[in-house]
Structure formats: structure tokens, C-alpha cells
Image (spheres, coloured by chain):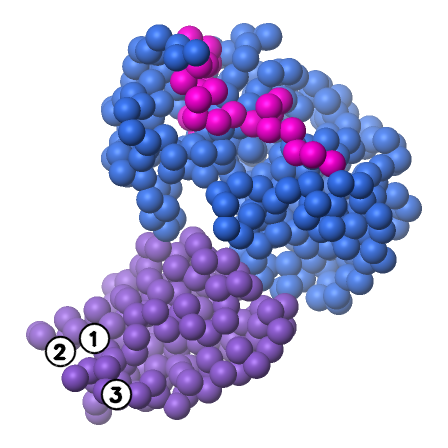
Amino acid sequence: MMNEIPLPDQLAEIRDDFLALAVPDRLQMLLEFSNELPELPERYRDHPDLFERVEECQSPVFIFVEVEDGLVHLYATAPREAPTTRGFASILAQGLDSLTVEQVLAIPDDFPLTIGLTEAVSPLRIRGMTALLGRAKRQLRERAAA
Amino acid sequence: MTVDSDPSPKFSAYAHPERLVSTAWLAENLDRPGLVVVESDEDVLLYETGHIPGAVKIDWHTDLNDGVTRDYIDGERFAALLGSKGIARDTTVVIYGDKNNWWAAYALWVFTLFGHEDVRLLDGGRDLWIAEGRETTTDATTPVAVEYPVVDRDDATIRAFKDDVLAHFGNPLIDVRSPEEYSGERTTAPAYPEEGALRAGHIPSAASVPWARAAAPDATFKTRAELDDIYLGEAGLQAGDDVIAYCRIGERSSHTWFVLTHLLGFDNVRNYDGSWTEWGSAVRVPIVTGTEPGEAPAARV
């Protein structure tokens, strides 16, 4: 059963770090994530075709999930004027990095609702992160089926 | 009015020039006693990345909307919110934000529901301020709390509900959403999250004037003459009209409400904040698909 796979430590840690903070401080931590969103690696910079636009996000954000030696890496790009979206992408880029495909697929779809950000950014906005996670998982499923 | 108006010549052609300030005026008046600058953005973190020195943040979702009922906060919470931001009843408030002041206009409209008298927009908003290389800071603003009175929200004058729209047929309606939403190709703005409406299309007889047409490329408002061409010329509004504007959840139409009320001088403009997410899902209300406005049904009074 998929749900017997526990939430990976790195995701649980991100969740616990957010939950340990008062609501206004959670926004600050989201901003830190936003600032930490890495630039795209050189090899993907000229390949917009690989990236999928996440329509559910209010600002243009593009993601691409790579599997290398069985481990997952998520790359995302979003403009500086969209710090919230960048923050969501950055949480997932760090939280999913180097997990196995099975581990990522086992992440509960409602993980974004459990990290204490719903109050801080509003339920409507958190949907953007749910969509990011959903699309990342779908890309992995498609790749596994190919 | 605590603080005098911006005398910029561009504004003098508008019906209520005192409702706008230019970036240059604001830069010179930032330290004026009795003036509070408010940033209101679509992105909840944008303020934290750098804001106009001394500006406070008010967020449409987390501050102005009720957390449970689909409605705005009540008079008590509005008083607590504004007091905590250092805004008194007679404070001059200048609001600015991202995306052509989209959300700033929404905040201004909510302030007006509570009758806050002197509330203005920064012409060009956040984008112009930054494009001009004006000062921003990430320093936290720590306003000194003041007393703001508890005022009842007036939901009759500038706000319309679904029944008001049904009774309004025969009078002008302005649909400010994208052409795709108007015609019924989609229920949400391109690239925006699905906010749930069961049908796509528009309210019968509504003219389509996408909200951002009121903005120039630098995010300032277009001139009076340009706005007259759009709203009186193309959309066919006439002086004295009773107008209802709507969009998807009432935010983009707040921007059009501002244009019609304060820039063009219409005295009877209401914003239907239930907008398409309500109308497009309501039982037994008429809708029209396609690019034509369609006939107004008989008003249901």
C-alpha cells in the first residue's frame, strides 16, 4: 500500500519548521524559500519545451521533473514579482530533491494544506502549491508509464 | 481632507482628481503627518520583498475577507485592522499595488464600503514606482496603533447583490473579464486558478470592457479623453447612468468601479462582488454565451 510509505524526513522537517512559527513568521520563512529557489541548471536553460506551465498558479511558473539514477529532481522557474509562487516551487524543489519516484508518488496530495501556510497565505492561494505537486507527480507517472 | 491634493495637470481632467496621486507627489509627501501609505497586492509576499518606505500592508484575502462567510469583514474588524495600521478615520490613505493597481482598487473599494472618506490610489502603482527607480525598503514598518471607530458597512450604495442585478436589467452592465470568459470559452481568466463556476458566459446585455483597458502600458490610468472613448463611446454609457460592473469575484470590477466613479464621475456605480462565481453557478438566472451582449430580460423586482 502506498500510504505505508512515511512522509520523507526532509518534507516532515519543512512542515515542522513552518508549524513551529507564528503565522506572520511563516510568511518570512516562505520568503526565504522564495529567495532560495535555484536558477535553472545550465543544461535546461535553453529548453523551455521541457517545462510545463502550471496554469493553476496566478503567476507564470514552469516546472520540469527529472529522474536521474532513480532519484527525483524538480526544477522550476517563476518571476521575481511572484515571490509566493517561487516560494511554493522552492519548497517542493527542496522537499522532493533526491527522493525516489515511489516516495514522491506517495506524498499525500494535501501535503500543502498541512504545513501551516493556509492561514498565512489563504486557502485560495495555497491551491497553487497543490497544483504544483499534482503536476510533478503526474509527470513522474507519465514517465514511469512511457 | 487632511492632506492637500496632488495638483498634477493630468488629473485635473478627471471628475475627482483628488482620488489620485502621482509617484512624484508621493515621494515628496511620504513624511506628511496624517498620511498613511498602504500596499495591497495580488501576491501576498510581494510587500515583504521591498515596499515604499513607511508603507503598511493590507492583504485582500487574509485581511479584508471574512475567513468563513463569503463576505467582507465587519465594522469591528475593520476598525481593529485600520487602527492597528495607524489609520484614523480622518487619515489620508494612499493605496498602491501590483498589476495596474488591481488589488489596490479592490482595497479602496472596501475602504469605501466603510465610508473612509479620503482614500486615494497611486497612479501607476507599484510597477511605476519601481520602474522609476524610487526607494523601496524591506525594513518592517511599525505603525503606532490609533483608534478607528466602528462603522457599519454600507452594502447598498456601491455594492450590488445577485437580486440587485436581476432588478437592474434594462440598465447598463459592464463585464470586465477577459473576452474568453465573456464569450463562455472559459470560466476563469487565462492562467488563473479555477474558482468554480458551473456555466461559462456572461450576464445578458452586459457590455464587454476588460478592466485593464483603463490602464496605460506604464500602469497609470489612461487620460480622461481615452477613457471617455472606451466607456462612453464603445460601451455606450451615458452621463447619469446607473451602472453595475462585475468580473469573477469582484476584484477586477473594483478597478472599473474606480474608473467610472472617480475618474469619469458616474454617481451610481455598483460593484457586483458575487460576480461570475455566483452568477455562473446560481439556479435559474439567465446567461448568454458568445461575443454579443444579448437582450436584457425583464427586470425581476
Q: Point out the frontmost of discs 3 and 2.
A: 3
**Residue A95 placement (x, y as % from top left):** 39, 82
Segment tinted magenta in the rendering: B151-176
For residue B111, what is the image quadrant?
top right
Please determine whether, in this image, residue B125 is positioned above or below residue B229.
below
Q: Earlier in the sequence, mark 3 or mark 2?
A: 3
Q: Give the residue pinned by disc 1.
A: A140
Please check the rendered image and state whether residue B186 is part of the magenta-colored stretch, yes or no.
no
Q: Which chain is blue?
A: B
Q: For mark 3, what is the residue? A: A5
Figure quadrant of the C terminus of chain A: bottom left
The reply to whether dot 1 and dot 2 touch (C-beta < 8 Å) is: yes
Colour chosen for chain A: purple
Q: Amino acid at mark 1?
A: Leu
The x and y percentages for residue B266 are: 62, 16
Q: Is residue A113 found left or right of B55 in the rendered image?
A: left
Please give the name of the residue rendered at 64% of the width and 15% of the height, measured from the top-left corner.
B267
Vertical side of B65 occupied by A123: above or below: below
Q: CA distance from mark 3 to mark 2?
A: 19 Å
Identity of the amino acid at label 3? Answer: Ile
Q: Quadrant of residue B107?
A: top right
